[in-house]
Amino acid sequence: MSFLSPHDLCRLGSTCQYWHTVVRDPVLWRYFLLRDLPTWSFIDHNSMPDVEKISQPLAELDDDTMHDYMTEYLKSCPGCRRRLKPCRRGYAAVTSFLHSLVINTEPRLAMFGPGLEQLEVSLVRKMMHSPDVIPVAGFPQRQINGIGSGISFMLNNQQRFNILTLYSTTSKERERARVEQNNAPNKMFLQEGEGAAECPTARHRIIPQVQEVCRVVDGFIYVANAETDRSHEREEEFAQIQAMTASDLGSSNRPVLVLSCVSRAGTRRIPCIYMAHELHLNRLARPWLVQDAEAETLNGLLNGIEWILEESGINV
């Protein structure tokens, strides 16, 4: 049965009770999971499988502790989830149109993370100079505690949104760290408590200017460096994500989009599911999505933007 696709096995299992039982073989579906997980381009808070259980050797499992790998696969596989996703009803489109008439302010998103600074190809520069993919819609004339107004973009020629990019330090220091493959000192955060310098998971405190940004945005975009040719400090990254999305700075329902980014096609990358696992995103008590992306072509970017706008209450 391993020569059949998971989709074909599901169809076979719907023919009768016998095949319904046979196709649920946990060893077979565990094989599918381990084979296909690295190829999936996105994973979210609803579909994240238990990586530790999946990786557990079969010799350590018995009939009582055997995991339901078939259910795990169908819940996590992007192709299966697309087929199960309900169609958008007509009244939803009308509601979206009326919503656009009532809401005058465009959604604002705070974008930060090492993938903005460490990659050879600048994601922000590509976004600003790719009108065929994501055209620039303007530069709002407003300030948030001296940080700036960000850049407004247009999605699918119909929905405006604003991105405020938060860098860790000056452009000169960022470029030096990128060339030397070091981590630039992040001036957006201050670690609290004794021994914070030695403990990456110590609670971070955001500087006041960035706190104001976090209070007014509708969601967060974290750009992670998914290239495998350098070391990463995922515990430190998770601590910073936690600080930026802290509940005392705003609603706990605001979504987090993680762009698991590489410079260009062909670059060896960390699969998105392992990125989610390394960043401990299952500890976040809010909606999140990890989306594979490429800075040079912007592949994956629009999929992530559509998701975060929908999670923010915008029908796109």
Image (cartoon, rainbow, N blue to C red):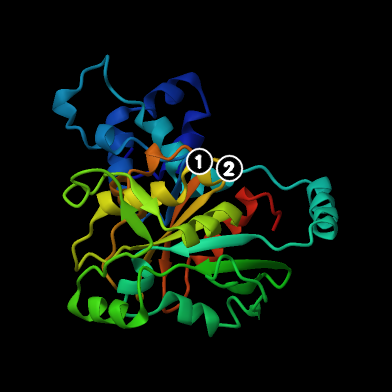
| Residue 246: x %, y % from top left | 46, 44
- For the residue pair 108 and 72, the one nearer the viewer reads as 108
Q: Left or right: where does residue 21 sit relative to residue 252?
A: left
- For the residue pair 98 and 52, the one nearer the viewer reads as 98
Give the numbered dot on residue 251: 2
SS of the residue at dot 2?
Answer: loop
Q: Are marks 2 and 1 in contact (CB under 8 Å)?
A: yes
| Residue 8: x %, y % from top left | 46, 41
Q: Left or right: where does residue 155 sit relative to residue 118?
A: right
Residue of label 1: 247
Q: Quadrant of the C terminus?
A: bottom right
Mark 2 neighbour density, 10 Å: few (under 14) some (14–19) many (20 or more)? some
| Residue 41: x %, y % from top left | 42, 57
Q: Residue 188: which quarter of the image?
A: bottom left
Name the residue located 38 percent from the left edge and 71 percent from the top edge. 116
| Residue 168: x %, y % from top left | 36, 68
Q: Quadrant of the N terminus?
A: top left
Above/below status of 159 relative to 59: below
Q: Hey, which residue is sitting farthest left in the picture?
A: 59
Q: Amino acid at mark 2?
A: Ser
